[in-house]
Image (spheres, rainbow, N blue to C red):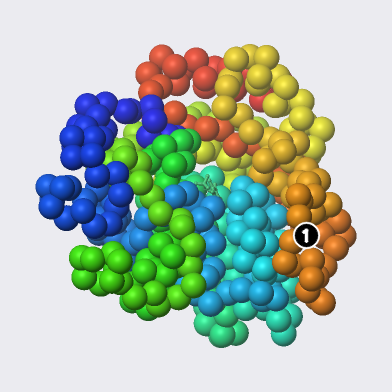
């Protein structure tokens, strides 16, 4: 999976260039920075790689989501359709915007299904926020068509799927905005970092201003800049951008290794009876960070996870029993445990999240196991994994 496996001289060189000037701020200080603009450079490279008009870096993926919602005009009281299978940050960003997350069912892609979204629509629906989970794509073209037909804003959470594509187009570039994370375990890491990408100049300019207290970033005198919006501070630091820049240059290599390792593993696992795989709307566009498969039922899945652990197969995730990525275990969220009253709690259409029922999603996630794909595996490591997986899973 992650870029942190391949830190090297490239990352060190970029970071040192920043430290040499002492300018850690991404804006201004034109003379002192000696032409070194790591955030800007990474943005240009990201937009180029993803074939989108604009990319704006920010402090992390969670803030990228908040920024995208704000820049797309989603705020207080708006309903945003979200999947129950995601990292909880997706939901947090909606809540923090004062908007209401409305959960819709996923399908065999393990991402929001177009039918699920259609069933969750209400007159208050303003946006659909699909998450391209575990390195691969939702049925994003169908979701886009649905959003266009209904006049809804499509925002993609592509935090886990940098470099994945659908029919030749990179995920993140289908919606009005797309969000990426460069946290420490993502495909490419800044340490902490995120990005909003878009093809719309207005969305980009709003995101750029909003993430820096509303500054319009026109001219080279920060004190004289106008404020085009109320905003906040979601800025990335040049040091983080420097790491990310070196990492992003390695993306193609990362994807190539992931795809090769995953293909070897998958070919071997296809021979094991009783196992099915997650549906990929476009298998060739999979970024291959995970190999995700399904067993016949919950009991066998739990049995398998336990046995795989005992056999030394690390990096196995059973999301149903895992506290991170599935709604079932988000008790803090269902109870809205918060140190202070949240804006959404003042809304008239505020739902009780304890009552959310997603039976179709439950029936999928309870049987789903994801295996993390590592970059550093040798052929011998792969052989060993295949043997352990085959022995354990055939036994079950
Ligand atoms: C990692 C992640 C985020 C949040 O990114 P951070 O940079 O850790 O804040 C949001 N959504 C998904 C699906 C993620 O995997």
In-front residue for pair 85/235: 235
Residue drawn at point x = 47 percent, y = 32 percent: 373
Above or below — where is 26 with respect to 311? below
Residue drawn at point x = 74 percent, y = 61 percent: 342
- In screen coordinates, is 219 left or right of 71? left
- In screen coordinates, is 271 left or right of 222? right
In the rendered view of the protein, which quadrant contains the C terminus?
A: top right
In the rendered view of the protein, which quadrant contains the N terminus?
A: top left
- On the image, the x and y values in percent for residue 250 come to 27, 39
On the image, numbered disc 1 is attached to which residue?
Answer: 341
- On the image, the x and y values in percent for residue 39 come to 29, 51
SS at mark 1? loop
- On the image, the x and y values in percent for residue 160 come to 49, 47
Q: Is residue 358 visible?
A: no
Ligand 1 within 8 Å of the CB at mark 1: no
- In screen coordinates, is 21 left or right of 230? left
In-front residue for pair 59/296: 59
Above or below — where is 38 with respect to 101? above
Residue drawn at point x = 54 percent, y = 53 percent: 62
Q: Quadrant of residue 347?
A: bottom right
- In screen coordinates, is 355 left or right of 388? right
Above or below — where is 32 with respect to 169? above
Above or below — where is 366 with respect to 267? below
Residue drawn at point x = 60 percent, y = 15 percent: 312
- On the image, the x and y values in percent for residue 7 come to 32, 28
In-front residue for pair 255/58: 58
């Amino acid at each position: 999976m992650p870029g942190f496996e391949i830190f090297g001289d490239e990352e060190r060189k970029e970071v040192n260039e920043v430290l040499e000037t002492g300018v850690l701020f991404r804006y201004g200080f034109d003379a002192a920075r000696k032409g070194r603009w790591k955030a800007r450079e990474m943005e240009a490279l990201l937009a180029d790689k993803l074939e989108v008009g604009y990319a704006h870096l920010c402090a992390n993926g969670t803030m990228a989501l908040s920024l995208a919602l704000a820049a797309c005009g989603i705020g207080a009281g708006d309903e945003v359709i979200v999947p129950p299978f995601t990292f909880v940050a997706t939901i947090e960003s909606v809540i923090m915007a004062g908007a209401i997350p409305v959960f819709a069912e996923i399908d065999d892609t393990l991402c929001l299904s177009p039918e699920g979204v259609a069933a969750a629509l209400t007159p208050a629906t303003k946006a659909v926020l699909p998450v391209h989970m575990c390195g691969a794509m939702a049925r994003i073209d169908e979701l886009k068509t649905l959003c266009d037909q209904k006049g809804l804003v499509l925002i993609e959470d592509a935090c886990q799927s940098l470099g994945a594509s659908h029919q030749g187009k990179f995920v993140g570039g289908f919606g009005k905005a797309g969000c990426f994370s460069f946290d420490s375990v993502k495909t490419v890491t800044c340490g902490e970092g995120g990005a909003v990408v878009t093809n719309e100049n207005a969305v980009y300019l709003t995101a750029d201003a909003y993430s820096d207290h509303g500054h319009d970033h026109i001219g080279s005198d920060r004190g004289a800049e106008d404020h085009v919006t109320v905003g906040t501070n979601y800025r990335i630091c040049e040091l983080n951008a420097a790491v990310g820049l070196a990492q992003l240059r390695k993306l193609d290599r990362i994807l190539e290794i992931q795809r090769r390792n995953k293909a070897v593993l998958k070919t071997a696992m296809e021979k094991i009876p009783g196992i099915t795989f997650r549906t990929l709307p476009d298998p060739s566009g999979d970024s291959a960070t995970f190999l995700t498969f399904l067993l016949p039922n919950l009991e066998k899945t739990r049995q398998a996870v336990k046995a795989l652990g005992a056999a030394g197969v690390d990096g196995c995730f059973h999301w149903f029993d895992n506290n991170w990525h599935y709604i079932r275990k988000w008790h803090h969220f269902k109870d809205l445990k918060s140190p202070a009253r949240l804006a959404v709690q003042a809304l008239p259409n505020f739902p009780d999240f304890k009552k959310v029922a997603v039976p179709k999603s439950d029936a999928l996630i309870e049987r789903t196991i994801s295996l993390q794909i590592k970059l550093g595996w040798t052929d011998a490591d792969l052989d060993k994994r295949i043997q352990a997986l085959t022995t354990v899973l055939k036994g079950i």
